[in-house]
Amino acid sequence: MERYLHSTALKATAAETLIHDKDNTDEFRSCEAEEPSPVERRIGDRYVVSEEEIARFKEDGYVHLRGVLSAEELAEIDEVYERFLSGEIEVEGKDLCDMTGEYGGSIQDFQLINVMLPRRYHPAWQGNLYERRAASISEQLIGGGLKLDYDQLLAKPPGEAEAIFAWHQDMAYWIDTPDTRTASLWLALDDSSVENGCMRFVPGTQLEPELRPHSPLKGDRGESHTLFTELRSDDEPRHAEIARGDCTVHSERVLHGSGGNTSQRWRRAYIVAYRAMETVEEERRQGFTHSHNDAHDVLGSVESMKPKG
Ligand SMILES: O=C(O)CCC(=O)C(=O)O
């Protein structure tokens, strides 16, 4: 319990600080181009995405957006996030788990803490400002007719060098549907760098004709939820170092994952995924809600869980 009490104290500095510290990386150089400031881009529920960012999302399969939430807006999220990490907000069964390994154990020992569907366990979050801004961003990036499919918290405590999120494409985790359009917003609650396990992507992999082959990391869905695929020798991963309040947005087919946390800081993220409305409806018809407590046969019906050969 003790370690969670310190997470808000470890809260990172404003976005601008990291940009100054890190101006030698590609990600941060791109922030210096002349563009409206985050304050100008946030207009109530809306966040204005530039043409260049839309093009980058299409080309790379992900894009980095600065200052999606302000310091004040983030503070409200921190408070609830802390209540999840301390166990004050109860999460049912396997929706609270360690994404590095098997189910079971206690949150104090988790290396990569995963809370699935926080809005289900804390209904006051439903329709919150982040969700509304994420809806506006998603529509600009992938078009209309979308619905919030799921949300998730992923936190790496300080010093968890093995808190590695295995390489994967999100579609490998999901059932197939005709319209797979997805915008997954990954909001950084802490400055996110290589040291504390930021996201990394292999740009362009969303354009490959087939999904890469994925396998369960450990046993079947009763034992662990995690899938993985191996990087190929010609893959060129790129780290997405982003500041607190920034988001990356990624598509359902881009190859991505994250490294361990070797720093003495937390790495907390809050994810919301908008997907085609028909897809969300089809998922629900099949009993697929993105909860790890969904029926075993439903979770086992995704392609990557089927026996090979
Ligand atoms: O937060 C991470 O480390 C991985 C997140 C991820 O894979 C996702 O949001 O699809």
Image (cartoon, helix red, strand yellow):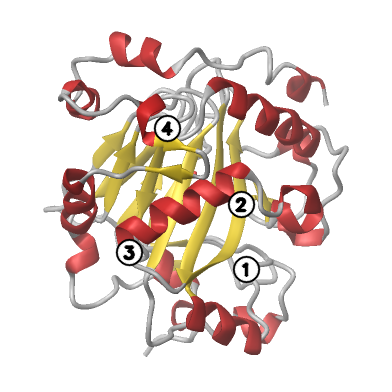
Q: Give the amino acid at mark 1.
A: His
Number of the label disc, if any, that sits on residue 246: 4
Q: Nearer the viewer, residue 139 or 202?
A: 139
Query: Do the CB atoms of the residues marked 3 and 1 lie less than 8 Å apart?
Result: no
Query: Do the CB atoms of the residues marked 3 and 4 lie less than 8 Å apart?
Result: no
Horizontal side of 168 relative to 11 (left or right) equals left
**On the image, numbered disc 3 is attached to which residue?**
142
**On the image, numbered disc 2 is attached to which residue?**
152
For image coordinates 55% across by 15% down, the residue present is 264
Q: Give the amino acid at mark 3.
A: Ile
Horizontal side of 236 relative to 161 (left or right) equals left
Q: Give the amino acid at mark 4.
A: Asp
Looking at the image, residue 68 lies above or below residue 72: below
User: How much space separates mark 4 and mark 2, taking CA atoms?
Assistant: 16 Å
Image quadrant for the C terminus? bottom left
Q: Give the amino acid at mark 2.
A: Gln
Mark 2 and ligand 1: say if the CB distance to the nearest ligand atom is below 8 Å: yes
User: How much space separates mark 3 and mark 2, taking CA atoms?
Assistant: 21 Å
Horizontal side of 259 relative to 261 (left or right) equals left
User: How much space separates mark 3 and mark 1, taking CA atoms?
Assistant: 21 Å
User: How much space separates mark 2 and mark 1, taking CA atoms?
Assistant: 9 Å
Mark 4 and ligand 1: say if the CB distance to the nearest ligand atom is below 8 Å: no
Number of the label disc, if any, that sits on residue 77: none
N-term-proximal mark, 2 vs 1: 2
**On the image, numbered disc 1 is attached to which residue?**
290
